[in-house]
Image (spheres, helix red, strand yellow):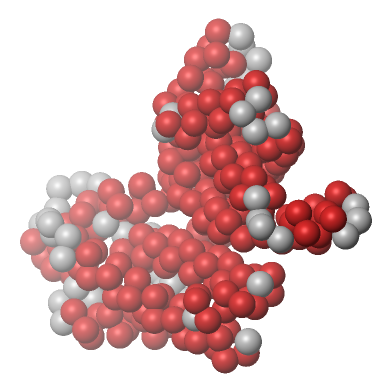
Amino acid sequence: MIAGVIGLVLRAVVVLAGAAILTFALLWHAPGDPAQAIAMARFDALLTKDVIDQVREEVGLNASFWTAFLDWVGPLLVLDFGNSAVTGRPVWPDLWAAITYTFPLALAGLAIGLAISLPLAILAAKRPGGLLDRCAVAIASLGAAIPAYWLGLLLILLFAVQLGWLPAMGARTTAHAVLPALTLGLGVAASLTRIIRSGILEARGKPFLPAIKRRGVSPKSIGRDHVAPHAAIPVITVFGLELAFLLEGAVMVEVIFARPGLGTFLLTAIEARDFPHVQAVVVLTALLFVTVNLIIDVLYRVIDPRIGGHHA
């Protein structure tokens, strides 16, 4: 068990190192002159060649690729993202301010998704093929097919434009978070409903369950001790991936609803070619994905140690 976890941690470190190198390489070799873009974002005026050359020297664009990468990745090991190439301020305070908007929104979307999917999947799995089951599968399939940006626009048209119940743009009050969180939550509910339902039905079809029933074990104990652990494995997988993808979805939803957060933070940084800001968001996202997958793999071993060798 311990050796398996150590192997997973080492694999996570390799993935993070690869993500860091790839991120830096893509930004380094992006088309256009980053020094000119940074200078324009700083001074917002007609620029001379001397000013552009000064900016290039100041932000280290004259150095070789590997020299610049090592200068960047060294502080990154202690989560020091350096200073903004545009404003000169440390990246962390601005990044943290964006996180305080995005993470609560993502968690609210996850809570809505669970509140909808869990009871719906359990009710649907009670009578496979019944009316409720068919309706649940149809609704979940429809929800999974609708992109988040399209669903967000539909909710704006209905609840903000037509009914006038909720605000569509900004983040001043709790009401401003309802439509973005609902947009994320409905997408999560669509995926989780199908997976939870399928997991329950598959677990109920295990060949050893009839023998356990003949021993006189109560249905409640069978569900708790046998069905739930087997159904939990695919559910944990999708739940973990949804948790990681919610960050990406929240970035898109923030742009649609004109909310501050990582979405606005990232778009502004890309337009200004502010490398430290862009790299901070990408590395943070990669760290989240790797951490979630690591937790999932460890949970696999806790729930069913027999599959440890398969995932190691």
On the image, which quarter does residue 176 sit in?
A: top right
| Residue located at (30% from left, 85% from top) | 70
104 over 237 or under it: above or below: above
| Numbered-mark total | 0
Residue found 65% across the figure and 21% down from its top: 131
Which of 78/272 is in front?
78
Relative depth, front residue between 49 and 59: 59
Q: Is residue 101 above or below residue 4?
A: above
Q: Residue furthest top?
A: 162
Q: Quadrant of the N terminus?
A: bottom right
Residue drawn at (12%, 56%), measured in percent from left and top? 32
Spot occupied by residue 197 in the image (x, y as percentages of width and height): 63, 42
Give the vertical position of 24 relative to 232 (above or below): below
Q: Position of residue 227 (x, y in %)?
A: 73, 55
- Residue 192 image point, x, y percent: 59, 43
Picture quadrant where residue 230 is located: bottom right
Horizontal arrangement in the rendering, residue 107 relative to residue 246 (left or right): right
Residue lying at the far bottom in this picture: please name it. Answer: 3
Residue 70 falls left or right of residue 177: left
> From the viewer's perspective, is 239 left or right of 216?
left
The reply to whether residue 15 is in sight is: yes
Q: Is 270 situated above or below 151?
A: below
Q: Position of residue 146 (x, y in %)?
A: 44, 29
Is residue 172 visible from the viewing direction of this image? Answer: no
Q: Residue at x 46, y 61 (%)?
A: 285
